[in-house]
Image (cartoon, rainbow, N blue to C red):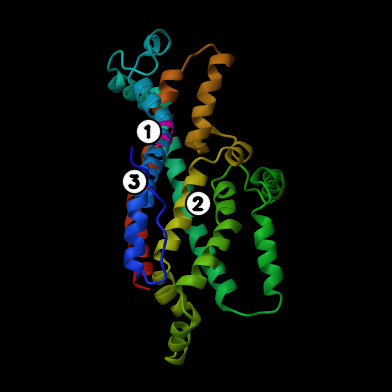
Amino acid sequence: MSTTHPTTTRPGDRPADRTAQRSAVRRAKGSAPPSSFSGAARRRSDRFVLAGLLLFALYSVFPVWWLIVAATKDQAGLYQTNGLWFSGMHLGTNLRQLFTYDGGVFLRWLGNSILYAGVGSLGGTVVAMAAGYGLARFDFPGKGMVFAFVVGSFLVPTAMLTLPLYLLFSKIGLVDTPWSVLLPCFVNPFSVYLAKVYTESAVPWELLEAARLDGAGELRIFFSIVLRMMGSGGATVFLLAFVGTWNSFFLPLTMLRGERNWTLTLGLYDWTGKRLESGLDLTGLVLTGALLSIIPLAVMMIAMRRYWRSGVAMGALK
């Protein structure tokens, strides 16, 4: 039986000889090099991360899948068949009933939601970009206090501001009008904060000073230079505001009384409650309408993708 003796390092050995001796000892003991261990551990870590991302993706897609399946069923199929698989294709019938029920009020609610979310988010984005640019690139007395108020404002829950807004709008006669929903959308402190942070990283001082030396006014600098350089930041602010306004529920519930001015979420909620009030079950119409309500959000996400791609490319070039 052979015995492996520990390898000793003599003063005259070269570094290459020492490395070879250590490798021979590891092979004799049956141990693998550290690099192979790190490679195996890395592969296991990658598989674990991939499995986690896959589970998260399934968890995120599951409600949408359930909604698609439910929108294709009739009233009996919703309660008597498997909720995760198709039992018949009644989507066309459900859509016809949805668009014709109560004189086509669903289309009215859809138009209202597009109006509130589109106009409100666009106006709010312009206001946020201007305010963020002013806080980032202008010095004035009380600037730090103003920014502190901005940060403190978006820490206050929106629901706490609904009642004061209702009392204010009731005094000036704006309750139950589109302005009662649009005006609060024009002011978003969190959007101002995002615009300020993005302006500080995307708009250099030197470019603004060069434009002023060339005789450009502040409005021209903002609309011709600043807004063009803040495309990806503006797209982010607009999309966040659009999604928030589109899904808004408590503000329209408080401000709007007549169903002709309701948003899509408020109208579908009212249909859900009719089962308890009058015994009329509109669950199929509610699910079909909920499925249609996510289409504008998906379209908006795809439309804004090119702005994020250009912003990432600009950051890579910088």
* For the residues bearing labels 3 and 2, Cβ distance under 8 angstroms: no
In the image, the segment drawn in magenta is 56-60
- Where in the figure is residue 308, as x and y percent of width and height? 37, 58
In the foreground, 11 or 20: 11
Mark in the foreground, 1 or 3: 3
Disc 3 marks a residue whose amino acid type is Ala
- Where in the figure is residue 279, as x and y percent of width and height? 53, 11
Q: Look at mark 2 in the image and give the residue it sits on.
A: 241
Q: Look at mark 1 in the image and give the residue it sits on.
A: 292
Classify residue 238 as left or right of residue 86.
right
> Which label was assigned to residue 28?
3
Disc 2 marks a residue whose amino acid type is Ala
Residue 187 seen in the current view: no
Q: Residue at x 70, y 50 (%)?
A: 168
Query: Helix, strand, or loop for circle 1?
Result: helix
**Looking at the rendering, in which quadrant would you find the N terminus?**
top left
Query: Helix, strand, or loop for circle 3?
Result: helix
